[in-house]
Amino acid sequence: MSKLTTALGFMSGTSLDGIDVALLRTDGEEQVSHGPSATFPYRPDQQAVLHDALTEAKALTSRDARPGILAEAERALTEWHAEAVERFLEANGLTPAEVDVIGFHGQTVIHRPERRLTVQLGLGPTLARRTGIPVVYDMRAADVAAGGQGAPLVPVYHRALAASVGERPVAFVNIGGVANMTWIGRDGELVAFDTGPGNALLNDWCERWTDVPYDVDGCLGARGNSNRNVIEQQLKNNFFATAAPKSLDRNSFDVRFVDGLSPADGAATLTRFTAEAIAAGVRLVPEPPRLYIVCGGGRLNPTLMRDLRECLQAPVIAAEECAMNGDSMEAEAWAYLAVRSLRGLPITFPGTTGVLMPLPGGVVARP
C-alpha cells in the first residue's frame, strides 16, 4: 500500500462565486480519504476585480503577460488564497506542518488551446512562501504546450471516485461556469470534454435582471418558456460538431443571443440550452452512460436538473446521492492532482485532452 499524502486543493472556477477548499489524503491513485471542505465566497468587490481581469485577458497573446488589471488581480487572488489557507487550517485545528502539499488551480482568465494559450492567474511561489507549504500550480500548461486541450483535468479523479459506483458506463457531469463530462467505461476507459456553457451565461443574465448573480433555486428559469428557435440556432455552433476531446473558454459563448427575450424566458432558454448541450455530448462517447452523476453549482438548480432528466435517457442524480460532495469535488480533484504531480504520475490523457500520450503536469513551488 502506497503512503498517503495530505493535500489541500483549491478551486476558483469560472462562475466566480468563491474559493472552494478541500482536504484529501491520497496516494494519487485508488486510495482516497476525504477530509473537511469549505467555500469562501467572493465579496462583490473581489468579483469585480475578477470580471475586469476576464475582460482584460481577452486581448492576451502571451501566457506570461499581465497587462493592465491582470497583475494586480493575480497578486490579490494569491493573497485571497493565502488567507483562505489560514482560515481553513484554523477552523479545522490544523497546522501548516500537517499539510504536505497544496494543489492551486488559480483563476482561468483565458483558455484558447487552439492557440496553445491558457492562463490561470495565481502566484504559486508567493502562496508557498505565505503558507509555508509546497504548492503545485499551473497544471494545464504542459498539456496545452504538448498540443492538448488542457481541460478537463478532473477525469482521473472522477475515475478514482467511480470505484464506489456499480454502474458502467457512468458519466460525471460537472456544471460550473462551463459544463464538462467525464465518461468512464466498463474497463476504466476515460473520455472527457467540455459540453458547452454551464452556469456562466445564466449567471450573467441573472446579474443583469435581478439582484443576485445566479438563478436562485432555478426560480427565474422555472417561470419562463425556453425559445426553441434560439436553442436550435446555438446548437449549430461548430463547437458541437467538433470531436472530443475539446474545451471552451468562459467567453466562447455570449449571453447576448437571448437579448430580446423576457428575463424569465431568457433564463429558461439558457437553462435548457445547457441541458441540451450536455445531451448532445452523449453522441461523442462510445456507449451511452447508464448513470449521470452531477456535480458543481448546476446540480443545485432544480430547473436545470429537470431539463437534464428530460434530455438524457438514463438516471440523473446529484453527487450527494452517492455519498460524494458536489461542492468540493473540483477542489478535491486539485488536491489529488497535486499528489499525482509530485509522484510524476500523468494527469492528462489522450481520451481527456487529446494529448498524444499520458502526460504529467504542474509546477512545484517550495517555501
Image (cartoon, helix red, strand yellow):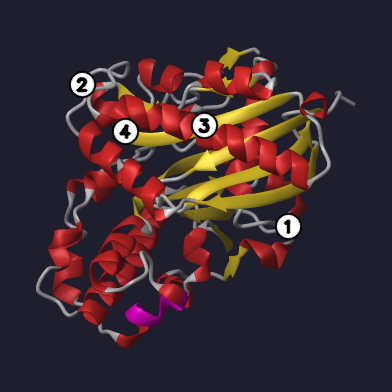
Q: Choose the circle earlier in sequence order: 3 or 2.
A: 2
Q: Position of residue 179 (x, y in %)?
A: 41, 52
Q: Secondary structure at mark 1?
A: loop
Q: Quadrant of residue 293?
A: bottom right
Q: Which residue lies under the disc numbered 2?
A: 61
Q: Residue furthest front?
A: 45
Residue 246: name its quadrant. top left
Is disc 4 surrounded by few (<14), some (14 to 19) or many (20+) residues within 10 Å?
many
**Disc 3, SS:** helix
Left-right relation of 322 to 25 = left
Q: Quadrant of residue 244?
A: top left
Q: Quadrant of the C terminus?
A: top right
Residue pictured at 58% horizontal, 47% vertical: 20
Mark 1: amino acid: Gly
Measure the C-alpha gap from mark 3 to mark 2. 26 Å
Q: Are marks 3 and 1 in contact (CB under 8 Å)?
A: no
Residue type for callout 3: Glu
Q: Quadrant of the N terminus?
A: top right
Separation of disc 3 and disc 1 at Cα?
Answer: 42 Å
Say which label, 3 or 1, has the lower sequence index.
3
| Mark with earlier residue (4, 3) | 3
Question: Which residue in the protein does label 1 denote?
Answer: 166
Q: Identify which residue, 248 or 187, lies in the foreground.
A: 248
Mark 2 or 4 closer to N-term? 2
C-alpha span from label 1 to label 2: 45 Å
* Residue under the point 37% across and 49% down: 45
Which region is colored magenta?
A: 217-221
Relative image position of residue 363 (x, y in whole percent): 54, 15
Nearer the viewer's eye, disc 1 or disc 2?
2
